[in-house]
Image (cartoon, rainbow, N blue to C red):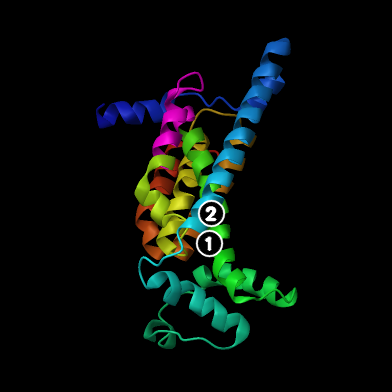
Amino acid sequence: MQMHEVGARLRTRPYSNPTSVATTGAGVGGKEEGRFCVHSACWVFVFVLCFRFANSLVCSTWFVPDEYWQSLEVAHKMVFGYGYVTWEWQEGIRGYTHPLLFAVLYKMLDLLRLDWPFILIVLPRVAQGVLAAVSDVYVWKLASRLYGSSSTAGLWALVCNVMSWFTFYCITRTLANSIEAALTPLILFHWLVATSQNTQADALWHTRAYLVLAALSVLVRPTGALLWAPMVCVHLARSDSIR
C-alpha cells in the first residue's frame, strides 16, 4: 500500500464508536452491537491483563542498567532517602517524571508498611504490566479502527503483539522506552479518532486524551517530541475541533 493510500485511509474512514452505535443505532440491533463491542473489549483486556501479569513475573532478569539506575534506584532514594544515583542525576540533567511514577508506588508501600524487598522489586513490573495490557487493547482497537470492526485485522494485530518475543522481554521492564512504547498505541488511537469525521464533543474528548498522553510521553522521554509534534501540527492543519 502506497503512503498516499494510507493517508487517504486515515482521513476518510469513519470512526465506529461502540457508544455512539449503541445510542444512535436503529433499534435493538444498534444497542446489541454496542454491547457486543464493549463485552469484547472487556474480555480482551482480561486476557491480556492475565498474560502481562505472568509476563511481569517471568521476566526476572535484567536487560540494561537503565531499568534500575534511571528509574527504580532514583525512586528508592526519593522515598527512602538512600540509594545510588549516577552522574546524570548528580548534575541535574535528567528529569524526574519517569522515576516519580515508581516513587508514588514506593510511597504507598511505605505508608502501608509493606516496603518489603520482594514487593519493591515486583510491584513496579506488575504496574508496567498493567500499562502494557492497556496498550495491547489499544493495539487491537487501533487496527479495528483502521480496517473496520468486521475484519479480523484487530485480532491478528493483537496476536502479533502478544506473540512478539522482544515485546514480551522488554514491555514490563522499568525502562522509559517501555513506557513510551506502551503509550504509543493509545496516543495513535485517540489522535486518529480526533482527526476523523466525528461530532465536535467526540473529537474534543479524544483530542484532549491524545494531547495529555503525548505530553506524558514527552516528559518521560523528551525525544518523543520528534514524533508527536508533527502529528499535532497535522491535526491543527486538518481540524478546527480544538480552536
User: Which is more toward the observer, 196 or 53?
Assistant: 53
Question: Which residue is found at the position 59% from the left and 76% from the top?
Answer: 117
Q: How many marks?
A: 2
Q: Which mark is residue 82?
A: none
In the figure, is residue 87 to the left or right of 24? left
Point out residue 207 in the picture as x, y percentages from the top left corner: 55, 44
Would you place residue 39 above or below residue 213 in this image?
A: above
**Rendered-image quadrant of the N terminus:** top left
Kind of residue at badge 1: Arg
In the figure, is residue 97 to the left or right of 33? left
| In magenta segment, residue 155 | yes
Would you place residue 140 above or below residue 219 in this image?
A: above
Prevailing SS of the magenta stretch = helix
| Residue farthest to the left, as pictured | 2
Q: Which mark is residue 129?
A: 2
Counting other residues with Cα less than 10 Å from the Cα at mark 1, is it few (<14), some (14-19), or many (20 or more)? many
Kind of residue at badge 2: Gly
Question: Which residue is found at the position 44% from the left and 31% from the top?
Answer: 143
User: Which is more toward the observer, 113 or 108?
Assistant: 113
The answer to which quarter of the image holds residue 77 is bottom right
The range drawn in magenta is 143-161
Question: In this view of the protein, can residue 138 be seen by the observer?
Answer: yes
Point out residue 151 in the picture as x, y percentages from the top left corner: 45, 20
Point out residue 189 in the picture as x, y percentages from the top left corner: 49, 39
Q: Which residue is mark 1?
A: 125
Asked which secondary structure carries label 1, the reply is helix
Asked which secondary structure carries label 2, the reply is helix
How far apart are the alpha carbons under marks 1 and 2?
A: 6 Å
Contact between labelled residues 2 and 1, with CB atoms less than 8 Å apart: yes
Question: Which residue is found at the position 51% from the left and 86% from the top?
Answer: 83
User: Which is more toward the observer, 68 or 11?
Assistant: 68
| In magenta segment, residue 111 | no
